[in-house]
Image (cartoon, rainbow, N blue to C red):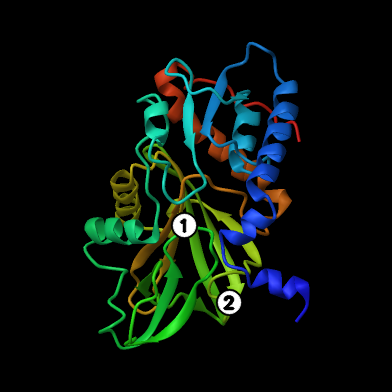
């Protein structure tokens, strides 16, 4: 076994610690913000991030570019501030540093179990299952986000794995491909949606193509209202939802909530203007408390 293959088998958080991932990301984010701010006037409005700093590939940078917003890192009640925490749970003392009007200030838990509980509450039908009593194919996933450890197992199981959750397998296959939906949430609106395609049996990773859609193209009015009810239950002001539609019963299921979204995999660059102009226009709703709802849309600098 090669050193590279051994490294890939290391579980998180040890892999991140060995590669000094947080420090590297902080450096990349800081340099990206400096380059972004250098293109704007010193008196341009500021969007503050705390406690972490976004990576330059995050859609929020494209949004700031189109709205002429500088990136700042000091949470203030008199300036737009967004709670930016890539971890599953917000640090215990973190909320005290955020102003009460901060975007996503109350979205403190995006764990898989919290998502499943909120979905069952608003939809009236569950995603989670008991692996000790449920027969047939199940999904086993890490409780924490971005662990990429999902797998399909056969129940009933003899025991639960610590740190994992268990969900029904939503059969979202179409013509030999795994069909996943993603929804961009901004305030009280679903700004945009994507279809994401990957070849079967790559249920959990390997998106080959992301296709932008309007929410109306993918969801009924009742389903859109349901998704917005879910975002309210999660206190998610800005972020993205991973949604699966069961091709057998037609029902949708939210399987993940992301409050610090990154650029979709394999989104054709020709679609960027439409995608990010749409998101920027919708994001202005979240800036209304600071009198910035009428910011003009600018031409992207890159």
Position of residue 297 measured from the top left corner of the image (x, y, whole percent): 60, 27
Of marks 2 and 1, the one in the foreground: 2
SS category of the residue bearing label 2: loop
Q: Which mark is residue 11?
A: none
Using the image as rendered, state which of residue 200 and residue 54 is in the foreground: 54
Position of residue 280 measured from the top left corner of the image (x, y, whole percent): 56, 34
Q: The N terminus lies in which quarter of the figure?
A: bottom right
- Residue highlighted by disc 1: 217
Using a 10 Å C-alpha cutoff, classify the residue at mark 1 as few (fewer than 14 neighbours), some (14 to 19) or many (20 or more): few
Using the image as rendered, state which of residue 297 and residue 130 is in the foreground: 130
- Relative to 61, is 2 on the left or the right? right
- Relative to 184, is 299 on the left or the right? right
SS category of the residue bearing label 1: helix
> Cβ–Cβ below 8 Å for labels 2 and 1?
no
Answer above or below: position of 300 versus 200: above
Question: CA gap, disc 2 to disc 1?
Answer: 25 Å
Q: The C terminus lies in which quarter of the figure?
A: top right
Q: Toward which corner of the image does residue 164 lie, by quadrant?
A: bottom left
Q: Residue at x 39, y 56 (%)?
A: 111
Q: Residue at x 60, y 26 (%)?
A: 67
Using a 10 Å C-alpha cutoff, classify the residue at mark 2 as few (fewer than 14 neighbours), some (14 to 19) or many (20 or more): few
Q: Residue at x 60, y 72 (%)?
A: 198
Answer above or below: position of 76 versus 150: above
- Residue highlighted by disc 2: 202
Position of residue 60 measured from the top left corner of the image (x, y, whole percent): 58, 37
Position of residue 254 measured from the top left corner of the image (x, y, whole percent): 38, 60
First in sequence, mark 2 or 1: give its number.
2
Q: Residue at x 25, y 60 (%)?
A: 123
Q: Residue furthest top?
A: 43
């Amino acid at each position: 076994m090669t050193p590279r293959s051994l490294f890939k088998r290391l579980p998180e958080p040890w892999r991140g610690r060995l590669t000094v991932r947080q420090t590297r990301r902080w450096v990349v984010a800081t340099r990206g913000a400096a380059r972004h701010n250098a293109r704007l006037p010193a008196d341009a409005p500021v969007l503050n991030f705390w406690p972490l700093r976004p990576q330059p590939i995050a859609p929020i940078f494209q949004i700031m570019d189109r709205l002429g917003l500088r990136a700042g890192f000091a949470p203030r009640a008199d300036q737009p501030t967004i709670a930016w925490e890539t971890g599953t749970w917000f640090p215990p003392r973190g909320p005290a540093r955020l102003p009460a009007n901060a975007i996503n200030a109350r979205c403190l838990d995006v764990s898989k179990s919290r998502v499943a509980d909120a979905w069952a509450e608003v939809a009236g039908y569950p995603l989670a299952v008991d692996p000790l009593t449920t027969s047939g194919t199940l999904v086993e996933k890490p409780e924490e986000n971005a662990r990429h450890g999902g797998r399909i197992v056969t129940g009933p199981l003899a025991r639960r794995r610590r740190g994992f959750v268990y969900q029904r397998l939503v059969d979202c296959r179409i013509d030999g491909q795994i069909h996943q939906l993603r929804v961009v949430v901004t305030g009280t609106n679903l700004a945009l949606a994507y279809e994401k395609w990957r070849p079967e049996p790559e249920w959990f990773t390997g998106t080959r193509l992301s296709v932008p859609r309007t929410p109306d193209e993918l969801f009924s009015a009742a389903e859109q209202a349901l998704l917005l009810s879910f975002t309210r239950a999660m206190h998610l002001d800005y972020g993205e939802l991973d949604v699966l539609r069961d091709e057998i019963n037609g029902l949708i299921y939210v399987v993940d909530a992301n409050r610090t979204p990154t650029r979709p995999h394999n989104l054709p660059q020709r679609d960027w203007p439409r995608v990010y102009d749409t998101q920027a226009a919708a994001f202005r709703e979240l800036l209304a408390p600071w009198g910035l709802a009428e910011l003009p849309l600018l031409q992207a600098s890159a």
